[in-house]
Amino acid sequence: MLNPAPVTDAIASTLLAIADLNAAMDGRIAAFHYRLGQEYRLAERIYKMAAPSMLVAWDGTLGGNFNGQTIWKHRFSVYFRMGNAAGLTDPVGYEDLWWIVCNKPPTGSQVNIRYMQLYPGLDIMDTPSVAHALDEDLQDRFAGAFVIPEIGDN
């Protein structure tokens, strides 16, 4: 099984390479790692996210077998807040941001993130999902989910 930490970094780097997304997030797309004493807890980090910004975090790994082979399903969450749309003539909303994530190719790629091998040894991701959430102040935010299978022990 691969270490999910560099995969988390690879996802954040790939998202940064999507020009329209990078512009909409003002370049604030980062990876979160669970390192006690070095970073906030995930819930606190999400709460303190500036608008606009994105945060990628490993959310766990599910193991199993398929056709006699070991398979791992790595789950990564992508938390995002849009920028303030007040006074903008063409604001970028949550629906627009998720569409950009799923459909715009990163710089230098002919395909979007759904059809890319984001890290050596991993397959392309399952179809991504997104869901609405509220923070402690009842502010809207969204969380996307990338599930990436790994077949065998790499």
Image: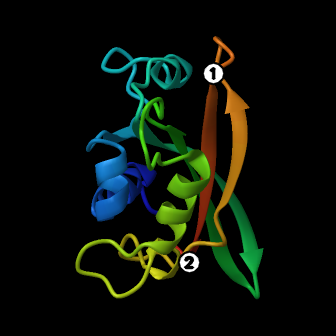
* Mark positioned earlier in the residue sequence (1 or 2): 1
Q: CA distance from mark 1 to mark 2?
A: 41 Å
**89, 60: nearer the viewer:** 89
- 92 up-or-down from 40: above or below: below
Corner quadrant of residue 33? top left
Percent across and percent down for residue 20 are 34, 60
Placement of the C terminus among the 4 image quadrants: bottom left
Helix, strand or loop at disc 1? loop
User: Dot 1: within a 10 Å radius of its alpha carbon, few (fewer than 14), some, or many (20 or more) residues?
Assistant: few
Percent across and percent down for residue 8 are 41, 51
**46, 121: nearer the viewer:** 46
- 77 up-or-down from 108: above or below: above
Percent across and percent down for residue 34 are 44, 30
- Is residue 1 among what the camera can see? no
User: Dot 2: within a 10 Å radius of its alpha carbon, few (fewer than 14), some, or many (20 or more) residues?
Assistant: some
Q: How many marks?
A: 2
- Residue 134 lies left or right of residue 77; in this view the side is right
- Residue 40 lies left or right of residue 93; in this view the side is left
Helix, strand or loop at disc 2? loop
Say the numbered circle drawn on residue 152: 2
- Numbered disc in front, either 1 or 2: 1
Query: Residue at image x 57%, y 72%?
Result: 125
Query: Residue at image x 25%, y 73%?
Result: 107
Do labels 1 and 2 touch, CB within 8 Å?
no
Say the numbered circle drawn on residue 76: none
- 82 up-or-down from 1: above or below: above
Percent across and percent down for residue 28 are 30, 39
The residue indicated by pointer 1 is 139
Look at label 1 and name its amino acid. Gln
- 122 up-or-down from 46: above or below: below
Say how the picture is coloured.
rainbow
